[in-house]
């Protein structure tokens, strides 16, 4: 029988423009929100992945960090 793995949080940050960063939606602000959410949910934060300069409308193959984040997910994450 396999041991059950503890669920964990995986973060993803993205900005497409410098203007977003200046408006308070920058990578540091997103990192703070991710850490707060993981703490509130009682989950250890495994890793945070970042795409800079990537549009939210871009396909997955143009957002490598999102693809990496999705690949890192396990059961219960």
Image (cartoon, rainbow, N blue to C red):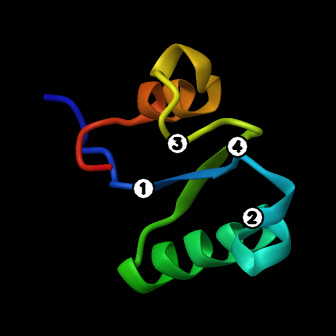
Residue holding disc 2: 20
Q: Nearer the viewer, residue 38 or 23?
A: 23
Q: Residues within 10 Å of mark 4 (few under 14, many from 20)?
A: some
Q: Residues within 10 Å of mark 2 (few under 14, many from 20)?
A: few
Q: Nearer the viewer, mark 1 or mark 2?
A: 2
Is 74 on the left-hand or right-hand side of 70? left
Looking at marks 1 and 3 on the same chain, the residue that comes earlier in the sequence is marked by 1
Q: Which quadrant of the rendered structure holds the N terminus?
A: top left
Circles 2 and 3, Cβ within 8 Å, touching? The answer is: no
Residue holding disc 3: 56
Looking at marks 2 and 3 on the same chain, the residue that comes earlier in the sequence is marked by 2
Residue drawn 47% across the image and 77% down it: 37
Q: Nearer the viewer, mark 1 or mark 3?
A: 3
Helix, strand or loop at label 3? It is loop
Q: CA distance from mark 3 to mark 4?
A: 12 Å
Q: Nearer the viewer, residue 38 or 27?
A: 27
Helix, strand or loop at label 1? It is loop
Q: Looking at the rendered structure, which numbered label has been put on residue 8? A: 1
């Amino acid at each position: 029988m396999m041991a059950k793995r503890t669920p964990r949080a995986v973060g993803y940050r993205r900005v497409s423009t410098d203007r977003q960063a200046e408006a308070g939606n920058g990578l540091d602000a997103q990192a703070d929100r991710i850490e707060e959410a993981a703490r509130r949910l009682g989950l250890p934060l495994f890793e945070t992945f970042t795409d800079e300069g990537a549009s939210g409308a871009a396909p997955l193959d143009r957002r490598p960090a999102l693809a990496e984040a999705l690949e890192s997910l396990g059961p219960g994450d």
